[in-house]
Amino acid sequence: MLDIRDVSKRYPNGVLALDGVGLTVAPGEFLVIVGGSGCGKSTLLRLIAGLDGATAGTIALDGTPVTAPRPEIGMVFQEPRLMPWLTIDQNVAFGIRHLPATERRRRVSEALARVGLASHARHWPRELSGGQAQRVALARALVGRPEVLLLDEPFSALDALTRTDLEEHLLDLWAFDRPTMVLVTHDIEEALFLADRIVVMRPGPGRIVAELVPTLTRPRDRAGAGFHAWKYRALVELDQATRRLSGEEAFPAAAI
Amino acid sequence: MTKAVRWPVGLILPLGLALGWEAAVALHWGNGRLLPPPSRVLATLIDLFRTGDLAGHIQATLQRVALGFLLGVAAGTVLGAVSGYWALARRLIDPTLQALRNIPSIAWVPMFILWFGIFETSKVILIAVGVFFPIYLALSAAILSVDRKLVEVGRIFRFSHREMITRVLLPAALPSYVTALRSGLGLGWMFVVAAEFMGAEQGLGFLLVDGQQTGRPAVILAAIAAFAVLGKLTDWLLASVAARFLRWEDGFRPVE
């Protein structure tokens, strides 16, 4: 269980990126955080990863506070961030360097096979397409079998076709050993396709303004009527949540 | 351009110049006494080679350069890595080293002679000092400019300080480091001459002084030619060894 309580983050330049964010994520749940740029969604993910520290509040995984990166928490960034001087298999092995060599080799080839890149093991990162590189990043994050996988807009730099392909792929990977997933995106459709639960964030300062639980059966069909109905509902709710708040903010005098 | 004709292209310029000079002297356009034609320089080299003198001079000089280079590289690498990675060390040592860097290395010669005598030690140390600074400067700067995004991947996998240096920072800094090694080697060849000017019984630098004192410009030019060939050969060796470790680079490659 990932437990985020009343978390605030103020950057050294004075900007309040998060203000009193509270959230719990159940084991094996696929949570998607949606919001526009600057709403603090990436900041929240970095705090969960232990890359940055919260100004106030606590983040705990299974009761233990997260203060630094932990082996149970994996992360995939917006860019693949592969080490350009390592071949693909060496990049994947990065995440399990503590294991004995034979076990490491077995797990790396297994992970690469699972993302469909077994034949690219000895290639250099520069020889891969954007989608392939991001799949390697997924393999690298999952090879250590983390309990929680954080994904920071992992597909936003990819074209639409590659993106839907990778979204389906991600669900397969999730189904394999059911880590808790926390994915950040600005794409409602992506959120609806992937999520058990969607959390909507708003900027200035970043906080959670709405929550949706799409009751769509898996596998979800993007072209289906149910999916469209949910998409409409999500957009309306998003619109309402943001309009209500921005109304208060834009004209504080109107409240008097 | 096919591979077989690529490298001889580099010979066109030196051979053309040599032939031109040879022709100019043969046609009495130039003064062959103070600037002997290539044929005389070559004959002098062959003479020196036959007597075994050339091998002795080359060996003495090579040994000094090699020792001084290794010493300078070792010190520059360790201190450069430490001051690039560790802020406190940087604050402590960098200002001093930057000040020392601006002292012309030759200025140390009288001191080195007093401290280490006029034999090998002072020569090797002078070369090492000359090699040290470009290596130190380039490595610490290269480490400071390593992509933060790659460093974060190391943090996610909880790399120790040692792992962060050896598995992320040094490989990422390698291209700049190689360039620094090559310019350091060039400086090594420069300083060996200065070192041998300050009193040596053998070495190519000694040969230069000897040629001057005995009024034999062909000997001077023979030594200069030997420097050019050795400098080029050692640089080529260094560059080709380094190229094996830089195959991953995704840089600009001009069309052949």
Image: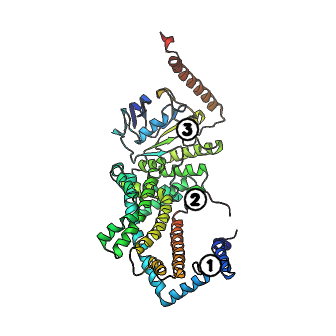
Q: Which residue type carries mark 2?
A: His
Asked if residue B64 is positioned above or below residue A200 in the image, the reply reads below
Q: How far across and down, in percent of the image, does residue B99 sit?
A: 37, 54
Q: What residue did someone put label 3 on?
A: A194
Q: Residue at position x 57%, y 78% from top?
A: B34
Determine whether label 1 and label 2 are within 8 Å by CB. no
Asked if residue A47 is positioned above or below residue A237 in the image, the reply reads below
Front one among A77 and B183: B183
Q: Residues within 10 Å of mark 3 (few under 14, many from 20)?
A: many
Chain ID, mark 2? A
Name the element at disc 1.
Answer: loop
Is residue B49 at least partly visible in the picture? yes
Gap between marks 1 and 3, in whole Å?
A: 85 Å
Chain ID, mark 3? A
Q: Which residue type carries mark 1?
A: Asn
Specify the farthest residue to the top.
A256
Determine whether label 1 and label 3 are within 8 Å by CB. no
Please tell me whether mark 1 or mark 3 is closer to you in this view: 1
Name the element at disc 2.
Answer: helix
Q: What residue did someone put label 1 on?
A: B31
Is residue A107 at least partly visible in the picture? no
Q: Which residue type carries mark 3?
A: Leu
Chain ID, mark 1? B
Front one among A161 and B214: B214
Q: How far across and down, in percent of the image, does residue B140 sit?
A: 42, 55
Query: Relative to residue B117, is residue A139 drawn left or right?
Result: right
Please tell me whether mark 2 or mark 3 is closer to you in this view: 2
Q: What residue did someone put label 2 on?
A: A120
Name the element at disc 3.
Answer: helix
